[in-house]
Image (spheres, rainbow, N blue to C red):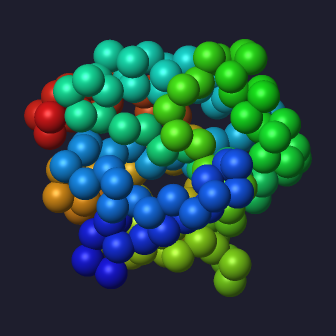
């Protein structure tokens, strides 16, 4: 795979989503969870999306239950939580594994393209973030504690 547009994933409603539909957009991919200390970052992710979507940013949320079982719900419960509590309207997808033998192919590719600190590929926790340019290439990777608002300058450079 040469860029994110080569992947198809399952949407939160069960549909197949071809990521090529986001060609030409700056993309922020985030593994999310509803019961995590970082869950309030949904507010910041939505704020970034609202601020920049008309200029070409898309945020893609991938629920994951691999870290402390902090995303125990099914897709309908996750979507309800996100829309009710954070008014999320950026694209959300079906729950995925981001590490291990059942890791989603998209996440294996993201980790290969941009390993973390000290070259370690594994995702460390919920709300790890990958920023991709308009060509679908991974530009940077951000730790869970990096607040969405701290990404604004990087996003601006790519828009």
Where 10 falls versus 148 (above or below)? below
Q: Residue at x 31, y 27 (%)?
A: 53
* Foreground of the two, 146 or 130: 130
How many numbered discs sit on the rendered protein?
A: 0
Q: Residue at x 17, y 58 (%)?
A: 135
Question: Residue 136 at what x, y percent from top left?
Answer: 25, 59
Does residue 140 appear in the picture of this structure?
no
Q: Say which quarter of the image contains residue 159.
A: top left
Where 131 falls versus 20 (above or below)? above
Q: Residue at x 63, y 73 (%)?
A: 103
Left or right: 83, with 138 as reference point = right
Question: Residue 11 at what x, y percent from top left?
Answer: 61, 53
Where 55 falls versus 75 (above or below)? above
Does residue 78 appear in the picture of this structure?
yes
Quarter of the figure that contains the N terminus: bottom left
Left or right: 109, with 64 as reference point = left
Question: Residue 31 at what x, y percent from top left?
Answer: 58, 48
Left or right: 148, with 135 as reference point = right
Q: Residue at x 67, y 49 (%)?
A: 12
Question: Residue 32 at what x, y percent from top left?
Answer: 63, 42
């Amino acid at each position: 795979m040469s860029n994110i547009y080569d992947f198809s994933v399952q949407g939160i409603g069960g549909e197949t989503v071809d990521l090529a539909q986001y060609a030409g957009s700056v993309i922020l991919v985030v593994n999310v969870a509803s019961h995590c200390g970082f869950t309030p970052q949904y507010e910041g992710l939505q704020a970034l999306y609202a601020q920049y979507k008309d200029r070409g940013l898309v945020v893609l949320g991938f629920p994951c239950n691999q870290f402390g079982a902090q995303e125990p719900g099914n897709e309908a419960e996750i979507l309800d939580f996100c829309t009710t509590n954070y008014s999320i309207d950026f694209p959300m997808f079906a729950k995925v594994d981001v590490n291990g033998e059942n890791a989603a192919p998209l996440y294996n590719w993201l980790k290969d393209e941009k390993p973390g600190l000290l070259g370690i590929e594994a995702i460390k926790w919920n709300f790890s973030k990958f920023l991709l340019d308009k060509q679908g290439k991974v530009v940077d990777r951000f730790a869970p504690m990096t607040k969405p608002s701290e990404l604004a300058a990087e996003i601006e450079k790519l828009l």
